[in-house]
Image (spheres, rainbow, N blue to C red):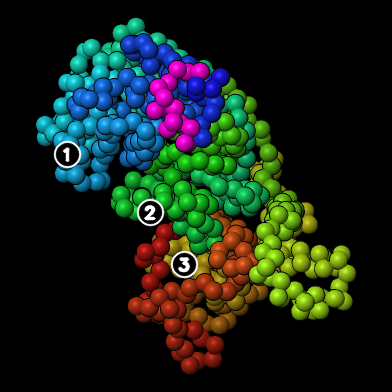
Amino acid sequence: MTFEELGLKKDLMQGIADLGFVTPTPIQQQTIPLLSYTKTDLVALAQTGTGKTAAFGLPILSTIDIENKTVQALILAPTRELCVQITNDMKNYAKHMRGVGITSVYGGASIENQIRDIKRGVQIIAATPGRLVDLIERRAVNLKTVRIVVLDEADEMLNMGFKDSLDEILEQTPDTKNTWLFSATMPREVERIAKNYMTDPAEISTGKKNEGADNIEHIYFAVNPRERYLALKRIVDYYPEIFGMVFCRTKAETQEVAEALIKDGYSADALHGDLSQAQRDFVMKRFRNRTLQMLVATDVAARGIDVDNITHVINYNLPEDVENYTHRSGRTARAGKSGIAIAIVSVREVGKIKDIERIIKKKFEKQPIPNGVDVCEKQLFHLVNQLHDVEVKDTEIEKYLPKIYESLQDLSKEELIKRLVSEEFNRFYTYYQDAPDLNPGKDGKNGVDGAFGNGRSTRFFVNMGMMDGFNRNSLKDFIADIASIQQRMVFNVDVKNSFSFFETESRFVDNCMAINSKDVEFNNRKVSLEVSNRKMHGGGSSSEGSGGFRKGGSSSGFRKEGSGFKKSYGSGSRDGNRSSSGRGERKSYGKSEFGKGRRS
């Protein structure tokens, strides 16, 4: 079936043709003919990314009275981003229709400008519930002329706490209106709206209630909770071409994970409720332009985000509400494309995977967390494919080729390829050669990564803690500096009030114990280390805990380990100035700036 077969007006067909649309999606095939020629209420069950905007937008444009400048259609959506997207799409559809007025109203923007747009005369408004209630209270908008109300992402609006606002808005609209409800899932509150505000609605479904999309592959990785962040990095490294979203449960966790990824050289940023609208817009612009590779977000902040070509959705933690998994995974595999949804779970959470499987009617594949060999192989062949497909600018490079050929003439083709690939592979190997196995063993502990590390580590007690101004990251910096080891070799850091614990590979025991003989002081207190048998709690890094196996602005795509980290010791300085006491090797560190402006 084509759009021409749906019987749309000629001027609408021109707009659709300009957008390159030819074949309607299943939800569009069912809704457009029904809503364009029949006055009816509708409950439509469809996943995000299935073309819902055109499914309700084209019928609205087919039925409005262009000569009448009153508000005839109201589209309610959960977020500013979705409102703007709907408005832009509708304007594109109506590109060749003269006299159509479409505007969007949402929080975080000038309400005076929005009132001015409405007073100019518009037939279609896309709105967030909160801002529309403000306009109703100011008597800036009249909904008595509304003939069609669309509730887009109805389940998400209710999850965000808009129940009362929706009730207030719907009560302001005529009883004779038609209500079209679009939702990915059908919780009880959505069913309540359908019952209270609809009359004998038609029902259309492109899937069963809460069912996941068919073109999404679902994978889960089991990991010890303290290794969750390391597992995230390992998984991301295993998918070199990832363009994805990472979902966390809380705003604090979202910010911490994003900051850790940025510090480790990844192209990432956070999206959560504590950001201003300007910050949110900036982050989303970067993500849409693909200058960000990963967006770390909370469920609430990600409501209504519609970004094309997201390859992976990673659940850093499973959602509290299992139904939210459907919304998260629906960010990928949009418009008929395929995608991968990944869950990082503790051994105790595996049962929750079974609960999700029952709801989405899809099976998860359990996979082992990739080891160093797996990642190196994947990255290596990604590099080979890039070399194979690289665009050659013949004219620009031609003048340099004779000298290049002369410099490399003593190398055979095989030797040249080997050296070119080794330039990058050596970096992969160096980074991952000591990487531990992150897969939990039968005893609940981590295993061994075969040729990539022996997994042996030693735990230390140190008489420095939060009262000295340390957090996990700053203590890592401090220990690595005074022990003269790479920062990534300090892991499983557990900071208490007046003391802390950390681990390092056993080969660095002498480096750490030598601190005692160096007579290092911090805030006029001698730094003392002891080997400890105490078990660690909470999250920490591992031997790959710092430094990024990612592209971070350099042509090589890697950050050098053990160099370039900022020392924050010193009095009132972020430059790491240290003063010598003049007694042998004794070091004295001034008042700490640790913990200020940095998250642990």
Is residue 488 among the parts visible in the rendering?
no
Q: Residue at x 30, y 49 (%)?
A: 277
Is residue 415 left or right of 107 when viewed as pictured? Answer: right
Closer to the chain start, of discs 3 and 1, is 1
Question: Considering the image in quadrants, where does the N terminus appear?
Answer: top right
**Position of 573 relative to 143 (above/below):** below
Which of 214/341 is in front? 214
**Position of 186 relative to 231 (above/below):** above
**Is disc 2 placed on a helix, strand or loop?**
helix
Which amino acid type is marked by label 3? Ser
State the image coordinates of residue 276 (x, y, percent, origin top left): 30, 51
Near mark 1 (Cα within 10 A), the count class, few <14, some 14-19 or many ≥20, is: some
**Position of 488 relative to 276 (above/below):** below
Q: Residue at x 51, y 86 (%)?
A: 586
Reading the image, the residue beneath label 3 is 474
**What residue range appears in magenta?**
5-19
Which amino acid type is marked by label 2? Phe
Q: Is residue 386 magenta?
A: no
Reading the image, the residue beneath label 2 is 282
**Position of 277 relative to 218 (above/below):** below
Is residue 130 left or right of 224 when viewed as pictured? Answer: left
Reading the image, the residue beneath label 1 is 115
Which of 299/111 is in front? 111
Q: Residue at x 41, y 13 (%)?
A: 34
State the image coordinates of residue 251 (x, y, percent, origin top left): 38, 47
Which amino acid type is marked by label 1? Ile
State the image coordinates of residue 26 (x, y, percent, origin top left): 52, 21
**Is disc 1 placed on a helix, strand or loop?**
helix
